[in-house]
Image (cartoon, rainbow, N blue to C red):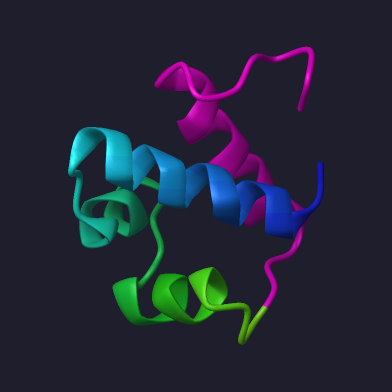
Amino acid sequence: MNQDDLRELIFQYVEKTGMKKKFIAQSIGENPNNFSRWLTGKRNYGPEREQQIIDFLIERGMLNAESS
């Protein structure tokens, strides 16, 4: 799974739940502005932050552990 796939899943999660992107950023310990830049493709994350996003999506049923 690449970062573009993760971005798409985050957008789907936001649309499905109405959750604020700021809350997601805070949930993974990221600055909301940096998270916004990541969502728009203006930056990429390293493996640790990428794993935090994967864990967030798994915990919320948007991704299963086998597909990550």
Q: Residue at x 31, y 46 (%)?
A: 14
- Image location of residue 3, percent across then percent down: 72, 57
* Residue at x-position 64% and y-position 82%: 43
Q: Which quadrant is the C terminus positioned in?
A: top right
Relative to 4, is 55 above or below? Answer: above
Magenta residues? Answer: 44-68
Foreground of the two, 15 or 49: 15
Which quadrant of the view contains residue 35?
Answer: bottom left
At 47% from the left edge and 33% from the top edge, which residue is drawn? 56
Front position in the image: 52 or 60: 60
Left or right position of 46 against 59: right
Residue 66 versus residue 63 in the image, above or below: above
Tell me residue 23's x, y (percent): 22, 52
Q: How many marks?
A: 0
The x and y percentages for residue 7 are: 58, 56
* 49 falls in the magenta region: yes
Q: Quadrant of residue 36?
A: bottom left
Determine if the magenta segment contains residue 47: yes
Q: Is residue 65 left or right of residue 56?
A: right
Give me the residue at 46% from left, 16% from top.
Answer: 61
Specify the quadrant that holds the N terminus.
Answer: top right
Vertical placement of 41 versus 58: above or below?
Answer: below
